[in-house]
């Protein structure tokens, strides 16, 4: 189980190969890559995004991500997990986050990957600022989305 918070980009194929190398009990790998969109809110009628800057508190952020992965491991039998979350100034099309989950079976692997991503969106201490295509003059902080919180609510234990 591995968590990284970094400014550098990542190679998805390389990360999957590292995670599964010599682990012949793996029967399924699920992954998610989040990218910077050029649309604020994701709709064509919204303002264009020229860049996104992600900020975080070193140490606290890694700990929060490790706790999310630990919770996934308590819920599902996972063989390996890799989470990479980037920070700094990113341009549209650049990767922000990578979640890779390896397990014996696809059902628990898919579920754990989705759980981790839902919790990253709502529990990880990152702050996002979008710049418009006209630069920093139109910068705005990105608020949490109700849809992200709704997605995370389904994982609450009964």
Image (cartoon, rainbow, N blue to C red):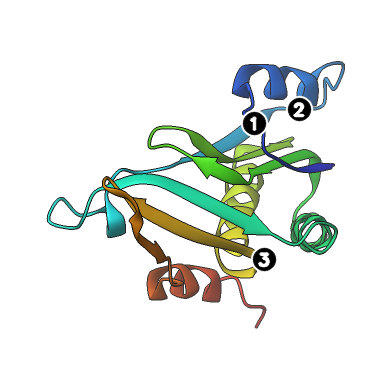
Give residue 84's quadrant in the image: top right
Rendered position, 7 above or below 63: above
Q: Residue at x 30, y 43 (%)?
A: 38
Residue 1, how many percent across, how many down?
A: 85, 42
Mark closer to the chain start, 2 or 3: 2
Q: Mark 3 to mark 1: distance in Å?
A: 26 Å
| Secondary structure beneath label 3 | loop
Q: Residue at x 70, y 27 (%)?
A: 27
Mark closer to the chain start, 3 or 1: 1
Q: Mark 1 to mark 2: distance in Å?
A: 7 Å
**Residue bearing mark 2:** 26
Q: Nearer the viewer, mark 2 or mark 3?
A: 3
Name the outermost residue toward the bottom: 158
Rendered position, 80 above or below 59: above
Residue 92, how many percent across, how many down?
A: 38, 37
Residue 79, how many percent across, how many down?
A: 82, 38
Q: Residue 125 has which mark?
A: 3
Drawn side of residue 39 relative to residue 54, left or right: left
| Of residues 93 and 67, the one drawn nearer to the viewer in this rendering | 93
Mark 2 surroundings: few (<14), some (14-19) or many (≥20) residues within 10 A:
some
Q: Residue 29 has which mark?
A: 1
Rendered position, 13 above or below 158: above
């Amino acid at each position: 189980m591995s968590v990284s918070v970094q400014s550098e980009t990542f190679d998805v194929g390389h990360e999957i190969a590292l995670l599964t190398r010599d682990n012949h009990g793996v029967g399924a790998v699920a992954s998610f890559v989040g990218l910077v969109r050029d649309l604020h809110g994701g709709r064509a009628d919204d303002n264009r995004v020229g860049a996104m800057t992600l900020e975080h508190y070193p140490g606290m952020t890694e700990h929060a991500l490790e706790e999310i992965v630990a919770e996934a491991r308590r819920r599902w039998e996972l063989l390996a997990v890799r989470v990479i979350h980037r920070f700094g100034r990113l341009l549209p099309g650049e990767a922000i986050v990578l979640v890779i989950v390896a397990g014996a079976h696809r059902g628990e692997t898919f579920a754990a990957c989705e759980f981790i991503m839902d919790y990253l969106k709502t529990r990880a201490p990152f702050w996002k600022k979008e710049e418009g295509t006209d630069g920093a003059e139109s910068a705005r902080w990105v608020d949490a989305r109700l849809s992200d919180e709704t997605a995370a609510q389904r994982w609450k234990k009964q």
